[in-house]
Amino acid sequence: MNEIINTRSSIRKYKDEPLPEDVVRTLAEAGLKAPTATNKQEIHITVTTKDHPVNKKIQDALDPDARASFYYDAPVIMYLSAEDGFKWSDVDAGIAVENIHLAAASMGLGSVILGCMKKVINGDKKKEYDQMLEIPEGYSFRIGIAVGYPDTAKEQHQINYDRDVTVLY
Ligand SMILES: Cc1cc2nc3c(=O)[nH]c(=O)nc-3n(C[C@H](O)[C@H](O)[C@H](O)COP(=O)(O)O)c2cc1C
C-alpha cells in the first residue's frame, strides 16, 4: 500500500517556520486535482497565513472546546468552500481536503483537517466571514486544513477491520 496512507496521521504541533509560496501552491493544486462529481470543480480554496486577522477572529468566536481544536499555530490555514445547492459539494470538499492532507505528508509536512469552525463561519455572521475569506458568491465554507512543518510525531490510529468491513464474496 502507498507508504503515505500507511504512515500519515493528524499533526497538531508545528515549527514556527513559514511555508514557501511554491509549497503552498503545490498543496492548493493537490486540492484542485481531486476528483469532483461530474467533474464539476466546484471547490474554492482560501489560503491564509496564521497572522491573518480572519484566523484570530474565528478563534475568538469559537467555544472554548472548539478553540482548543482550531489551527494549533500552524503557519498556513486553508479554507475550502464549495458551491451551494450542488448535492456533492460536501463530499467533494472532503476528497479535496484529503488530497491536500496526503500531499502535505508526501512532502514531509504535517497537517490536520479542521471542521471545528464550521458553525462559526456559516452562522449569523456568515456574510462577514465569507467576505474576509473571499469565498465566492453562492459558495459556503465546508472544511479547513492547517499545514506546517511538524514538530511532533504521532502513531497511526488503530483500525478495526473485522468491525468495519463486510466482505461479500
Ligand atoms: C471532517 C473532519 C473534521 C475534523 N476536524 C478537526 C478539528 O476541527 N480539529 C482537530 O484537531 N482535528 C480535526 N479532525 C482530525 C481528526 O480528529 C483525526 O483525523 C482523527 O482523530 C484521527 O486521527 P488521525 O488523523 O491522526 O488518524 C477532523 C477530521 C475530519 C475528517
Image (cartoon, rainbow, N blue to C red):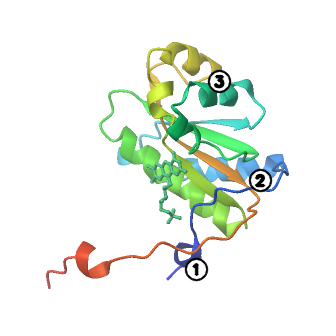
As helix, strand or loop, the secondary structure at mark 3 comes to helix
Point out the tag, 3 or 1, that comes first from the N-terminus. Answer: 1
Name the foreground residue: 134 vs 113.
Answer: 113
**Distance (Cα) linking label 3 and label 1:** 37 Å
Q: Look at the picture and state if 44 lies above or below 97.
A: above
Of marks 3 and 1, the one in the foreground: 3
- Tag of residue 23: 2
Does mark 2's beta carbon lie closer than 8 Å to ligand 1?
Answer: no
Q: Position of residue 160 (x, y in %)?
A: 33, 77
Q: Position of residue 59 (x, y in %)?
A: 62, 31
Q: Position of residue 111 (x, y in %)?
A: 63, 56
Q: What is the residue that sits farthest to the bottom in this orientation?
A: 169
* Amino acid at circle 2: Val
In the picture, the quarter occupied by the C terminus is: bottom left
* Amino acid at circle 3: Lys
Q: What is the residue that sits farthest to the left in this orientation?
A: 168
Q: Which residue is mark 3?
A: 57
As helix, strand or loop, the secondary structure at mark 1 comes to helix
Of marks 3 and 2, the one in the foreground: 3
- Marks 3 and 2: CB-CB under 8 Å? no
Say how many tags the image has: 3
Q: Could you tell whether 34 is left or right of 14 in the image?
A: left
**Distance (Cα) linking label 1 and label 2:** 21 Å
- Tag of residue 3: 1
